[in-house]
């Protein structure tokens, strides 16, 4: 039988149902299927780029329309299978308690355990292999933050949730604490209905943002976002934004913490996402004392590696500058006052001035 004939014989509606079932069996919380028309989202992306709100993330503009036109990124793509996986770690320190403890370092909940990229990609590969048992050879490619993909737009089109006013995807049954992944495919699967929005008049995420990065509904200036400042930015953190960062040393969850829909958030069943090295509330002074070798060893296989050791020290220096004044904080900062990195020295000097030392 030819490939074309074999494809004609496939019951794609039944296959779509099987794909969603297989996805759940592989540990994904949900899966949905969308087409490739993202015209409205492409316009929104272009306006965001034109406003310069992507900051130093030049890769956001580098790929042109391939980000919003899946068939340009992967020729032959007809459908995108979007999946989500819950990451909220069970037993992690209460987020608000850590944020209120000025001597602790706050790490975004998604980054407390193993880096999700390889885990999700391997599960997507297994999903593709199951599809292969039904349709034979087919065109596909798996993506998890690894290419120019409008993952939230695709997930919204696939019915997995709506994009909230803070620009994070929200699911009615599960809140927003989940990762996304995609399987681009040339299979003509039936598509799901896009998710409708349910933010209503709520503006808690806009009001809570410490650095006022959310300019208005669906308008995020990444240059002011704490996640950008502590992860993506490689140079100096603007001085006027250092105090609002508080004790957030890698990422920020405030806009999700106040979202009413996260009362439905599901704790992850994935053991790899459990907190490592007590990073759900570790002491700033202790973390600042890590050598580069310790940093590399203790963050192996974790998303925290993305900030690099210099960025790690920069971020913790800012947090120590915002911490309650103490001899321990001043001693820790003074130990790094002559650090080889000009970036680290600058932020240490700022922190020491705040500590009165």
Image (cartoon, rainbow, N blue to C red):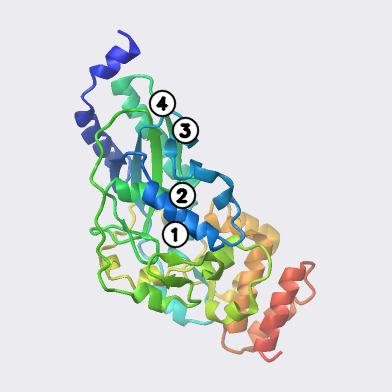
Q: Earlier in the sequence, mark 2 or mark 3?
A: 3
Q: Nearer the viewer, residue 64 or 77?
A: 64
Q: Earlier in the sequence, mark 1 or mark 4?
A: 1
Report the mark closest to the observer, 4 or 3. Answer: 3
Neighbours of disc 1 within 10 Å: few (<14), some (14-19), many (20+): many
Circle 2: element type: helix
Q: Nearer the viewer, residue 214 or 296?
A: 214
Q: Which residue is depicted at the point 58% across and 77% down?
A: 241
Residue 300, how many percent across, how many down?
58, 52
Report the mark closest to the observer, 1 or 3. Answer: 3
Distance, label 4 to label 2, CA atoms, is 24 Å
Report the mark closest to the observer, 1 or 4. Answer: 4
Residue 90, how many percent across, how many down?
35, 62
Tag 1 residue: 110
Distance, label 1 to label 3, CA atoms, is 28 Å
Distance, label 2 to label 3, CA atoms, is 23 Å
Report the mark closest to the observer, 2 or 3. Answer: 3
Tag 4 residue: 139
């Amino acid at each position: 039988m030819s490939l074309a004939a074999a494809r004609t014989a496939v019951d794609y509606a039944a296959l779509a149902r099987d794909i969603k079932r297989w996805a759940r069996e592989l540990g994904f919380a949900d899966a949905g299927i969308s087409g490739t028309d993202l015209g409205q989202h492409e316009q929104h992306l272009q306006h965001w780029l034109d406003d310069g709100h992507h900051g130093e993330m030049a890769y956001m503009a580098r790929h042109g329309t391939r980000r919003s036109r899946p068939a340009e990124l992967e020729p032959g793509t007809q459908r995108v299978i979007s999946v989500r996986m819950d990451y909220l770690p069970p037993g992690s320190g209460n987020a608000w308690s850590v944020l209120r403890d000025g001597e602790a370092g706050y790490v975004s909940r998604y980054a407390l355990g193993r880096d999700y990229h390889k885990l999700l990609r391997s599960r997507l590969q297994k999903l593709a292999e199951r599809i292969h048992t039904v349709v034979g050879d087919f065109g596909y490619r798996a993506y998890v933050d690894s290419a120019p993909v409008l993952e939230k737009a695709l997930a919204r089109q696939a019915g997995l949730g709506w994009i909230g006013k803070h620009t994070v995807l929200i699911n009615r049954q599960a809140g927003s604490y989940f990762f996304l992944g995609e399987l681009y495919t040339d299979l003509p699967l039936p598509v799901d209905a896009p998710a409708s929005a349910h933010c209503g008049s709520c503006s808690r995420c806009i009001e809570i943002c410490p650095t006022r990065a959310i300019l208005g509904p669906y308008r995020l200036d990444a240059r002011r976002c704490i996640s950008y400042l502590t992860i993506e930015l490689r140079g100096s953190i603007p001085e006027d934004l250092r105090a609002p960062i508080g004790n957030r040393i890698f990422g920020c969850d405030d806009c999700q913490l106040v979202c009413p829909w996260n009362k439905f958030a599901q704790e992850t069943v994935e053991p790899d996402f459990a907190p490592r090295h007590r990073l759900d509330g570790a002491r700033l002074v202790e973390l600042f004392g890590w050598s580069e070798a310790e940093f590399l060893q203790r963050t192996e296989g974790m998303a925290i590696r993305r900030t690099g050791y210099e960025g790690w020290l920069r971020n913790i220096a800012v947090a120590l500058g915002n911490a309650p004044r103490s001899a321990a904080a001043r001693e820790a900062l003074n130990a790094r006052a002559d650090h080889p990195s000009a970036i680290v020295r600058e932020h240490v000097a700022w922190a020491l001035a705040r500590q009165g030392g």
